[in-house]
Amino acid sequence: MTVRVLVVDDHPLYREGLVTAISTMAGKEVVGEAADGAEAVRLAAELVPDVVVMDLHMPVLNGVDATGQVTTQHPSIAVLVLTMLENDESVFAAVRAGARGYLLKGADRAEIGRALDGVSHGEVVFSAAIASRVLSYFAAGRGGPELAPFPELTDREREILDLVARGLTNAAIARQLVVSDKTVRNHVSNVFAKLHVAGRAEAVARARDAGLGQ
């Protein structure tokens, strides 16, 4: 069976190279390519590939949110993350969003080919360095900041989003964090922009779904 692949990356040269590499692999067919997360969601619905190879740091819609939309709308589609981001919160955010695999961009053609086969058959695939860290975290029963949601947010933005989700006003957040109202307003605006939400209510809903504001 041929594995049909959608390639998503905002860097044209890397994307072209990846498309070429996958196209030469036995039993693989690249059916489309996208330059941002929103385009990835649209093409996934249109093409219904077996696997979406997804970068994380992209414009318009980041790879974590795009992964969540693709896997929610099309559970049969496997998402294989291929990124330069190897921090723990990016890994866990992608897995929570539904990614079945996580490789770093240093992966060679053979590793990418094996991962495409694996995730298309329902397996979960991590690059060696990522896998050892994932296993160690679960073995130690760890949670905490490594599992922090919304990797696109800074620590301060995530802290403010948590307080927003608890129902605090901007003024109350400013008092609690001992910063100016203007600083809080700026952070809140940045959070809304990064999460692509229309307002406070939608941000609160997203935050509580991710476990914040408890």
Image: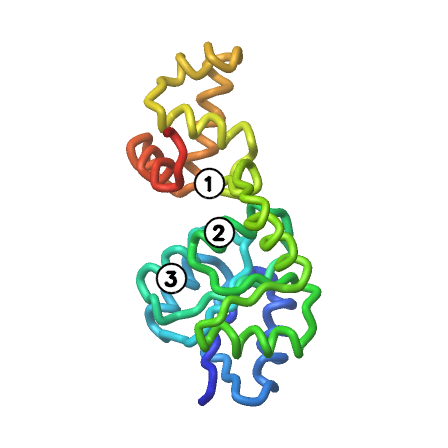
User: In the rendering, at what x and y percent does residue 12 appear?
Assistant: 60, 66
Residue 8 appears in the rendering: no
- The quarter of the picture where the N terminus appears is bottom left
Residue at the spot of label 1: 194
Report the Cα–Cα distance between label 2 and label 1.
9 Å
Q: Is residue 207 left or right of residue 54?
A: left
Label 1 or label 3, whichever comes before in sequence order: 3
Q: CA distance from mark 1 to mark 3?
A: 19 Å
How packed mark 3 is, by other alpha carbons closer than 10 Å (few <14, some 14-19, many 20 or more), is many
Tag 3 residue: 70
Q: Secondary structure at mark 2?
A: loop
Residue sitting at 47 percent across and 69 percent down? 52
Q: Tell me the colour scheme of the image.
A: rainbow
Estimate the x, y position of residue 28 in percent, counting from the top left: 52, 84
> Which callout, 2 or 1, points at the residue further toward the start of the chain?
2
Residue 46 in view, yes or no: yes
* Discs 2, 1 touching: Cβ within 8 Å: yes
Instruction: Give the amino acid type for the residue marked by disc 2 in the picture.
Output: Asn
Task: State the image coordinates of residue 41 (x, y, percent, origin top left).
Answer: 39, 62
Q: Residue furthest left?
A: 201
Residue drawn at x 43%, y 51% as measured from the top left: 65
Q: Are marks 3 and 2 in contact (CB under 8 Å)?
A: no
Q: Which residue bears the numbered disc 2? A: 62
Q: CA gap, disc 3 to disc 2?
A: 12 Å
Type of amino acid under label 1: Lys
Nearer the observer, 7 or 144: 144
Q: Is residue 171 left or right of residue 133?
A: left
Q: Position of residue 201 (x, y in %)?
A: 29, 32
